[in-house]
Amino acid sequence: MMRLALGTLRRHRGAYLGSFLAAFLAVALLAGAGLLLFSVLTAKPPADRFAAAAAVVSGDREVTLTTTKKKKKNKVKSKTKSERLTGAGTLPADLAGRIAAVPGVVDAVADYAFPVVFPVRGEDDAPVVGHGWASAALTPYTLREGRPPAAGEMVIDADLAARGGLSVGDQVQITTRTGVRSVRVSGVAAPDGRDGLAAQGALFLADRQVPAVSGLDGPTAIAVLAEPATDLAALRAVAGDAPVFTGADKVRGDLPGALPDYIGPISIFGFTIGITAFAAVFVLTGTVALGVRQRLRDLALLRTAGATPGQLRRLLGLESVVLAAVAAVPAMPVGVVVAGLVAARFRALGAVPAQFTVAFNVPVLICAAVAGVLVTFVAARIAGRRAVRIAPTQALTETATAPRGGMLVRVVAALVTAGGAVAVLIFVPLGGPLGMGMSFVSSALLLCAVAALGPVLARGLTAVVGRVAALGGVTGWLAGTVARAESRRVAAVAVPLVLMFAINATMLLNSSLLGELTGDEHAARSAPATAQVTGPGGLPLSVAGDLAALPGVTGAAATLPTRAIVAQGGKPEDYPSQGLFTAGREAAIDLDVRDGQLGGEGTFAASAYLVEQHGWRVGDEVPIWLADGYQVTLRLAAVYQRARGFGEMALPADLVAAHDPRGLVAAVALRYDGDVAAGIHQRWPALRVTPAVAAARAGDAQNQQGAWELMVVISLGFAAIAVVNTFAIAASSRRREYADLRLAGATAGQVHRMATREAAITVTVGLVLGAAVTAVVVGAFSTAQDGIFRLIVDPVTYGGMLAGIAALGMAAGALPIRAVLRRRDLPAVADDH
């Protein structure tokens, strides 16, 4: 059977070219996405700031909740869920002394790590983190010039000095959550053999000044310098509940903001693998099915020779495995290149850390190849399920047709997938953070329904579109007649066009809608303000208070971006939030409060979405974990509607400033009369006053941009292969038909016009079905956002996609026909029976 499969592939190279290219693309993309996912899952911090320490005792870095549930027979089931903190919890100030007393411990260094706004950033645009001078020995940093810092002084790493053109004696202004200070450079230090640490810049203050500058009430970590035989059990006993890290895990004790974050890329690359597998099965099924249809007479001959349907299924499966295995050989190295290109693009977008590199892994490549082979095999089995039941007598006929039937299976599959899409669109909250992902799921389900009923839908639409085409004369009438008679062929080309248009249009239009709504809500929130004030890197909360107290200011609102965690169903959930400070007799921000009232001691406000998700009511007491793991119980005082680009909770600004490691005001909205701006510029020259508030970008905008680009490449690549291949095979298989038309007196131009009109009918059918899928999903998504039903969000994007996909379809339909009509022996084909 292997010899027969190889011979078939050699003989029908053209028919299987599209399947080969689709399998090649599938393996290449799966390999690339697999390498990227493997790389982010195994990525290690680029540097270990605690390299000189034997162990690190850390403050809280995550919130962990354990729930227990009683089962039958008195059994108890425990479930533990954790959520990472965006800040660093602190340790008791006296813990370092107690750890130093453990036998074998040489020294215990209390490390106070805190973000600093510095005139320049570190290597690869890394954040700058401040420490006490005692922490320099933990890496270790050694002085290259100057001396250790005294009060009002600092030592900076050599990389910061070079980037900022700084030297010993220079005065530099730094900003932390406790205020703005002018600090003198007393020295320049660096780790051995380097100018600084990758992923973070460092500056060191006098140890006794660190609490006042950082605002920390205790160290964020304690580095333990110990003898090799030190009893770690005794160390852990003294540390209590605080985690103790050793070896490669020591970096987990660092400030979270100083370590690369790969949470977003993990979801993106996992999503890429999913959409690649979906598109591969979707397209390969169509291309393989078309190739099988071209071989119906061969299959009938094999049936005549005694082959059973089961043997034919095994033959088709074996052919698909060989085809995919051959395609995987060049696809795997291409996947490595794809991973490198995607990583470079994501670094440029800022969606992954600048230090991110792709790790080469042979097992990942092999798994991608195996997955590609399996996907192709499944597609071949689906595509050949009816063709193998062809009657042996059809080998004696001029034209063989696949057995009819299977409509019940198609209808059931369409009902199930369409029902799933409707369920997602109705019952899943599309207005929440899962809305974009669920819109893709609903699009995929509707595409499966369209694919299942492709011939039926194509037959109905071609009946309408074909009659319109008939208005263009005899060639249009003939094109419409042929299209109606060959509805399966029309469906084979139209379905990839539906995939190409619906997936991209849905995602891009929904993304545009979110951006538009975010901008509108931001403008509405800031409408009461006269101007906004921002500073380089942020402002201390005290400056916001001073701005609110300026003469002529009638209202002020300062926002401090942060993340907060609340429990839902025993699981800690992390939400973007804002610290909110308001002052004055007039409101400077409008959150569109629907219930309750903003403000009040020990209170917070939440978005309508969050309130609905958790079942809260105004007046409820809610436990909330702040960025550093500090838990506080606040009373829900207000429910607001305008959360886009703002956050799901508005917390007291002083709490956020005290417990978020950054704790800086992003912007201060002011409402005033008179020339307040002049007074601000005079007192704070570095501050910027703008009369209009530009819409803030979403925090994951870079990740979304990277995801959309990958999605477009995947869907366009697969759909283009399917469309071009289907048209090419169809044109080649109709040479006899075109020759008959030429012998009947039709000119080459007339045949070409007929084929072009057929392509136009097919493209129209595909775009109509794609537009229908898009309208259902976009309309439901739009209604979920603000109650307004929209079919088209961005006419330019929508029209551009329609025109681009139509042009691709027309080119794919016209060029193969032109090539066939140019053959000089075309009229002789009619006699070749």
Image (cartoon, rainbow, N blue to C red):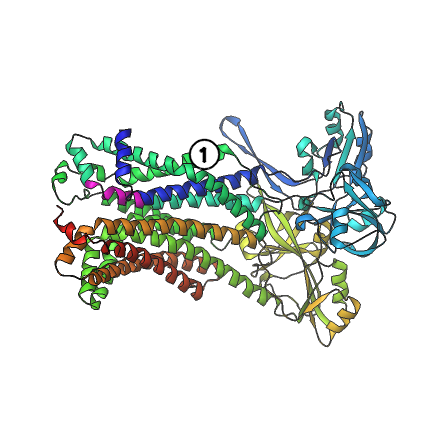
Residue 141 in which image quadrant:
top right
Q: How many marks?
A: 1
User: 94 or 456, which is in the foreground?
Assistant: 456
Identify the residue at image location x=17%, y=65%: 474
Q: Is residue 57 magenta?
A: no
Q: Which residue is mark 1?
A: 367
- Specify whether 481 is left or right of 555: left
Residue 435 appears in the picture as rendered = no
Magenta range is: 285-296
Callout 1 secondary element:
helix
Name above or below for residue 516 compared with residue 832. Answer: below
Residue 263 appears in the picture as rendered = yes
User: 676 or 765, which is in the foreground?
Assistant: 765
Q: As shown in the figure, which amino acid type bears the numbered disc 1?
A: Cys
Q: Position of residue 728 (x, y in %)?
A: 28, 50
- Specify whether 732 is left or right of 432: left
Q: Point out the residue furthest to the bottom here.
A: 674
Residue 545 in which image quadrant:
bottom right
Q: Point out the residue furthest to the top here.
A: 229
Q: Is residue 295 magenta?
A: yes
Name above or below for residue 617 compared with residue 573. Answer: below
Residue 319 in which image quadrant:
top left
Name above or below for residue 78 compared with residue 207. Answer: above
User: 610 or 596, which is in the foreground?
Assistant: 610
